[in-house]
Image (tube, helix red, strand yellow):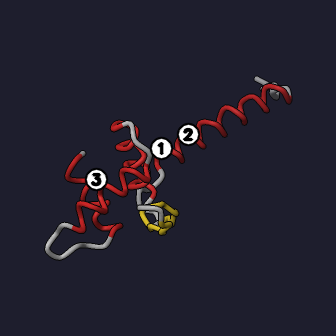
């Protein structure tokens, strides 16, 4: 039995389909452990930068959307709450704790 080679268009379709499936697999299997990403936020008229891992930035954005406020406003609320603590944590740590305890 002689096997006939696939025509180039079919080979290309298979490659594209396989490549897209592989990219989907990679994106689904991407590790949640990424280095922190630094972003600028404005609190009480002052710009400051915060370093958070991408998963926390995503959670923060989702929390702000659920509350119908901008991310800056939510960060300002978290900042005000942390400053009331007996020993205030750093802002990035306060955001992480807030996200974990309120979600």
Nearer the observer, 4 or 42: 42
Query: As displayed, is residue 45 above or below residue 101?
Result: below
Q: Position of residue 64 (x, y in %)?
A: 38, 43
Image quadrant where residue 52 sits: bottom left
- Foreground mark, 1 or 3, reads 3
Q: Position of residue 79 (x, y in %)?
A: 31, 62
User: Which residue is found at the position 67% from the left and 31% from the top?
Assistant: 17
Whether the residues at callouts 1 and 2 have beta carbons within 8 Å, the answer is yes
Q: Where is residue 26 in the image (x, y as percent from the top left)?
A: 54, 47
On the question of residue 58 being in view, the answer is yes
User: Which residue is found at the position 40% from the left and 41% from the top?
Assistant: 69
- Secondary element under disc 1, as helix, strand or loop, is helix
User: Which residue is found at the position 35% from the left and 43% from the top?
Assistant: 63
Whether the residues at callouts 2 and 3 have beta carbons within 8 Å, the answer is no
Quadrant placement of the N terminus: top right
Q: Residue tagged by mark 2?
A: 24
User: Horizontally, is 40 left or right of 65 in the view?
Assistant: right
- Foreground mark, 2 or 3, reads 3
Q: Distance between the residues labelled 2 and 3?
A: 28 Å
- Secondary element under disc 3, as helix, strand or loop, is helix
Q: Residue tagged by mark 3?
A: 99
User: Horizontally, is 79 left or right of 73 in the view?
Assistant: left
Query: As displayed, is residue 78 above or below residue 38?
Result: above
Image quadrant where residue 11 sits: top right
Q: Spot the residue most to the bottom.
A: 87
Q: Residue tagged by mark 1?
A: 28
Circle 2 Cα neighbour tier, 10 Å, few/some/many (<14 / 14–19 / ≥20): few
Quadrant placement of the C terminus: top left
Q: How far apart are marks 1 and 2 (CA)?
A: 6 Å
Circle 1 Cα neighbour tier, 10 Å, few/some/many (<14 / 14–19 / ≥20): few
């Amino acid at each position: 039995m002689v096997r006939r080679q696939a025509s180039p268009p079919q080979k290309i379709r298979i490659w594209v389909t396989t490549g897209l499936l592989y990219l989907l697999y990679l994106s689904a299997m991407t590790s949640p452990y990424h280095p922190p990403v630094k972003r600028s936020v404005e609190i009480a008229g002052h710009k400051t930068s915060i370093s958070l891992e991408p998963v926390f930035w995503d959670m923060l954005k989702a929390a702000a959307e659920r509350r119908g406020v901008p991310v800056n406003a939510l960060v300002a609320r978290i900042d005000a709450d942390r400053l009331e603590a007996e020993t205030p944590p750093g802002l990035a740590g306060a955001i992480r704790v807030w996200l974990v305890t309120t979600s």
